Image: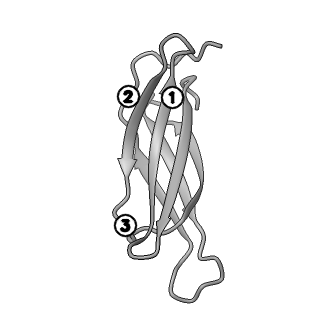
Amino acid sequence: GPDGCLYVVARRYAVASGFTFRVRRLSGGPAAWRDDLLYVSPPAHLGNAEGLGVWQEAGGDLGVTLITDDGFWPLTSTRLIEMRLPPGEDCALGF
């Protein structure tokens, strides 16, 4: 991301409840990894998130854009989802 953190979308599928996904922010380094869980979608509510982009507004606030795919399935839809992110503390990644 523009703040030096690594942002990850992790998705999960269950037959009984459908797709759910999480947005995580990783910072730090091997000696002190920090893993912040930023968002968890309700099961079968927003779809199958397949991509994410993190951007920064002029005022410094961070946002994320997620895309879900319908997979050519008539009961689902393709969506663009945007949300603001809480600020991170120190987002320098060190390896």
Q: Position of residue 8 (x, y in %)?
A: 55, 41
Residue ID at (44%, 50%): 22
Q: Give, as a three-letter code, the residue at label 3.
A: Pro
Q: Give, as a three-letter code, the residue at label 2.
A: Pro
Comes first in the chain, label 2 or label 3:
3
Q: CA distance from mark 1 to mark 3?
A: 24 Å
Q: Between residues 13 and 85, which one lies in front from this camera angle? A: 13
For label 3, the crowd category at 10 Å Cα-Cα, with few meaning under 14, some 14 to 19 and many 20 or more, is: some
Taking the view exactly as shown, the residue that stands out farthest to the bottom is: 74
Residue ID at (56%, 15%): 29
Q: Position of residue 90 (x, y in %)?
A: 45, 15
Residue behind mark 3: 43
Comes first in the chain, label 1 or label 3:
1
Residue behind mark 1: 26
Comes first in the chain, label 2 or label 1:
1
Residue behind mark 2: 87
Q: Give, as a three-letter code, the residue at label 1.
A: Leu
Above or below for 66 versus 1: below
